[in-house]
Image (spheres, grey):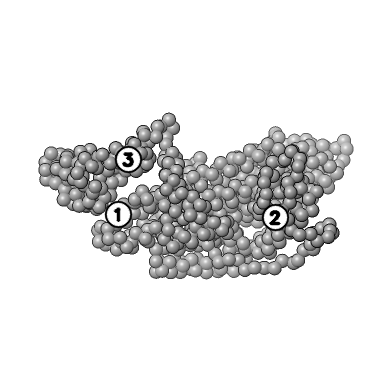
Amino acid sequence: MATASAEDAARVLEALEHARLVAQLYADAEAELFKKVADRLQERLGEPEYEGARFAEIRELRREAERIVGRLERAAAKAVRDGVTDAWRRGVDAALEDLRGLGSKKLISPGQGVDVLVGQTLNLVTQVQAGALRAVEDIYRQVIARTVGLSLTGALTRREATQRALDRFANQGITGFVDRAGRHWDMPSYTEMAMRTAMTRATVDGHLAAMSENGIDLVLVSRTPHGCPLCDPWEGEVLSISGPAGTRTEPHATRDDETVKVKVAATVAEARAAGLLHPNCRHALNAYLPGVTQPAPPVKASGTYEDTQEQRRLERQVRHWKRREAAALDDDARAKAGAKVEEYQARLRELTKATGLRRRSGREQIGVPRPPRPKQTPAPKPPRQRPERPEQPTVEPAEPSTSSRPPGVPEHWPVTLRGLPEEDLLAFMQWYTDDPDMQERFLTYLDELEQREAREDADPGWAWSWEEDETPEDRRITELVAGGMPYLDAYAEVHGLDSGELRRQEELSLLRQERETGETLDAMVRRLYAEWLDMQVVEAENATRGVLLNKQGEAADIDPRTLFSGRADRARTYASEELLRWWGDHPRMTLTEFKAQMLERDSDRRAARRIREGSAGKEFGV
């Protein structure tokens, strides 16, 4: 009799939990990105006049964001590949387990379907990473612009205005990810939606592929606790993998020359289109044997579907206020956000106690950096059996003389095994199979890996943190930056590079990222110059309260935007005193000077020098 077994529920829950853990990576990165923005804004609060976002600040913030997103990208790519592939295999294994009970010995291996699904999911999460970098810069600029408007009225202090503007974005999260229905998602929610969809599809498709390969076309929808309105109509129904739906006459599963009538509610594809097996769905599909399989009984559970939705709402509120806490500029704002976190956690405790629902504290986390995990000593494993040999002095192994070097094996020693991909490690072991010293190194390293995995398995509360992925070089760079050294200079010092050349190459790389299709480098610089002029106009309007022209300029109906480029004498003639003072701190810049700053070419620098020398110091701010 096919019922909704504990194995079915565990298989589906494991897939959904993996999706949540991948989303946790993005929540962790989102919180850290907000913290970087808040730190940058905190540094600006002590300035005598609140200026607009400067290019140097934006570049520095982008570098910090790229470090976080780069680590996120590496961790997420592996998590996506492993999660989707494992979900597919779990679906196949569950189907084969049922089929083996029926005497089937046929196996099935992963095909192109799971590879395509992995690729599609990777594309979705990669879009999130690229959008996050752009969103961080946009949030920083918009917080500054909103702060100027709020603080100029005098109703709020600069700190209050900055905190209010930053809270607004922390409430929303890093958004900008839109699905086909036009709905906007924040970064962790979008990732979890994509991963849940992929994991559900992989689990079900693997299950269906195994059954189809073994000639089984009918499946029974399991029953689960806390079903939703989309799924409830399908519980206990028979579906067909290939169709058609309706009442069908099928041969009895165990009796020869006997048939039974089976009511097929729909095809699997039709049920999916109607809402079954949605991203949060916990239902499974089991083989249906005509004449043998009986409908599964209803499942009793603590709480109701509405209770579970209230639990999800409270969990979202906890995460929301934890984001606010990460974006706080001072202890007071941090304490207020922390109090709200405790309030919603208390309501969660009350709900779970009253309904009997299980509280999942992992869903309340946003992944802000935590103190190091306490070390837990796992049960000791017996050491690997090593061949006995007389003790020898430690020497570096000689290279094998054969020329058929496999991929992944470097030409020269010494070699660091730590961090080596598994496939490369296997290549090493095969390559040095006759070298006892190298075999000893391999076995020691494998023991270390097993002990590390055992420690992680012994700590079920562990979740990935970007800080734990740092290398010693990363930590040294962080220390230098904390001591006041610019990030690029710190990177150059740690890696033994020329900071000036590194800065020029990085700025050129960042500029090339701004190029549009078919656009030359000079055309791109002209476009960026126009955008910079627009920013200058907006910042000048905020600083001068809109007073950009003097009486002569107003009488001549001059467009104030035209004063920010072009001839200096014309700008001096029509600009207001407020604007002239602002230009003293924020110099006007010609296109040639802007190009010299962006491209750092010698020819542009010489041209910019001639312009400055020709102005005899009369240009504003030069």
Residue 10 numbered mark, or none: 2
Q: To which residue does mark 3 refer?
A: 605
Front residue of 370 and 170: 370
**10 Å neighbourhood of mark 3: few (<14), some, or many (≥20)?**
some
Q: To which residue does mark 1 refer?
A: 51
Please identify the residue farthest to the top as the structure is shown.
518
Q: Which is more N-terminal, label 2 or label 1?
A: 2
Residue 118 image position (x, y, % from top left): 63, 42
Amino acid type at circle 3 is: Arg
Amino acid type at circle 1 is: Glu
Residue 386 image position (x, y, % from top left): 81, 58
Residue 598 in which image quadrant: top left
Residue 570 visible to an observer of this rendering: yes
Q: Are marks 3 and 1 in contact (CB under 8 Å)?
A: no
> Residue at point 37% right, 36% down?
524
> Residue at point 37% right, 41% down?
600
Residue 6 visible to an observer of this rendering: no
Q: CA distance from mark 3 to mark 2?
A: 66 Å
Residue 48 in which image quadrant: bottom left
Amino acid type at circle 2 is: Ala
The number of numbered discs placed on residues in the rendered structure image is 3
- Circle 3: element type: helix
Residue 506 in which image quadrant: top left
Q: Which is more N-terminal, label 1 or label 3?
A: 1
Front residue of 502 and 537: 502
Residue 308 numbered mark, or none: none
Residue 320 image position (x, y, % from top left): 47, 59
Q: Which is more N-terminal, label 2 or label 3?
A: 2
Residue 146 image position (x, y, % from top left): 32, 54
In the rendered image, the vertical position of residue 405 relative to residue 441, given as above or below: above
**10 Å neighbourhood of mark 2: few (<14), some, or many (≥20)?**
few
